[in-house]
Amino acid sequence: MEQIRYAIIDGAVEDELVRFLSTQTPPHCCLYSPPVQSEIVELAPYLVQITPEVDEWLKCRTTPWGITLFSTKPLHLLLQHLRRYLWVKIPEQEKTVLLRFYDPRNIWAILDVLTPLELSSFIGPISKILTNYDGYSHQENFESAYEEKYITSSATEALVLSSRQFKKLNKLTKANYINKLACFIRDYYLADKNFLHPDMEAVPQQAEDYLFFCHAFNIVDSRSVRGITLALLKKGITRTTEIPQQWEALLSNSNQSIYYQVEKLLLQELGYIPE
C-alpha cells in the first residue's frame, strides 16, 4: 500500500497553525479527543496530511513545530492510534500526564526508554518517523518493529512508565538539551573574534551550568534559555557565580510571568530579544 506522509504540528509552538489549516484546508484533525475547549483549540497539536501547501509551509518553520510520520493508514485510523499515547502514567503521580511525543526534542528519548513490546505498540501503523529541528535531521524506519500479534493492551489503557524508564527519560532529555546548548555556545565562540582562545573542553559543563541557572527560575522554553545564554556570553560570564544579583532579582519577580521577566532582562542587557 502507498505510504501517506503526515505531520503532527503543535499549535502551542506555531501560533499561525489554526489560521493556516482553515485557509488551506488540508486533511487534518485535532490530536485531542473532542470536545476540545475553545480556549485551547489554537494551542492543541494537530495531525495533518502533508499536501504540497503544507510541505511549503513547514519548510519556512524554524520552531520545534512537531514531527513527520509515514503510514499506510488513513488519517482517522492513525489519529485513533496516536490518541492512545497522549497521556502517560509516571511514578508518584496519581493522574496521567500529557506525553508530548510530537515534540522533536522528546520523541527519540521517549522511544529509547520503551521496552520492545511498548515500542511495538507505540509504533503501531507508523512505518517511519522524521524530525528536522535546529539544524539536526533524524529519521528511523519501523516497518519491522510492529508485530500485531504481540499487541495485547486495551485501546483505552494508558502507557505506564516505570521509575527506571522515567529517570532514564529525564536523563536523556537533559543530556540532549545540554549537547545542543553546548553546540550553540561553541558556535558563538567560533564566530566571535573577541574570544581568541576559548576553553572548548569546558563548554559542556558551561552549558549544564547555564541550564541549571535557567531551570532554577523556571525558565524552560528553548528560546528563553538560549536568550539568557546569549546574554551571558556577550557579558563574558562563564560561571554562574559571576551572574549579577540584579539579574536574579529581576528573574525572581513573582508579580510577573517568567517570559516577561526574561524579555525585560534581554532588552536591558542586549537591547533586543533574540529569535
Image (cartoon, rainbow, N blue to C red):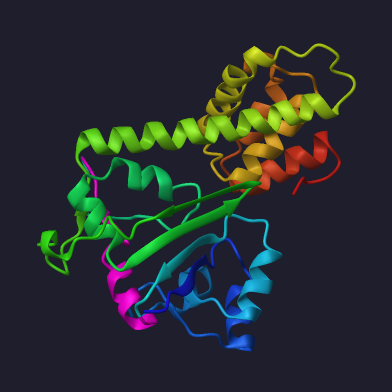
For this orientation, the residue located farthest to the right is: 193
Report which quarter residue 205 is drawn in: top right
As drawn, is 102 to the left or to the right of 167? right
Which percent across, then down, holds residue 136? 60, 45
Residue 94 shows up from this direction: no
Q: Is residue 201 left or right of residue 85?
A: right
Please count the marks in the image.
0
Residue at 32%, 61% in the rendered image: 143
- Residue 220 screen position, x and y as percent: 54, 41
Using the image, determine if residue 60 lies above or below residue 131: below
Residue 260 or residue 110, whichever sits in front: 110
Residue drawn at (64%, 27%), measured in percent from left and top? 248
Does residue 230 lie above or below 82 as drawn? above
Is 156 magenta? The answer is no
Q: The magenta stretch spans which residues? A: 74-91
Q: Is residue 34 visible?
A: yes
In this view, the residue in front, 87 or 216, is: 87
Q: Is residue 87 magenta?
A: yes
Instruction: Please indicate whether residue 105 sits to the left or right of residue 250 in the image.
Output: left
Camera-nearest residue between 164 and 245: 164
Residue 151 locus on image (x, y percent): 14, 62
Residue 244 lies in quadrant? top right
Quadrant assignment, res 195: top right
Q: Looking at the picture, how far across and down is residue 120, in whole percent?
A: 23, 56
Q: In screen coordinates, is 218 left or right of 275?
A: left
Q: Residue at x 19, y 61 (%)?
A: 147
Residue in the picture at 29% in, 41% down: 113
Q: Which of 206/82 is in front?
A: 82
Position of the N terminus, as image quadrant, is bottom left
Q: Is residue 191 above or below residue 227?
A: above
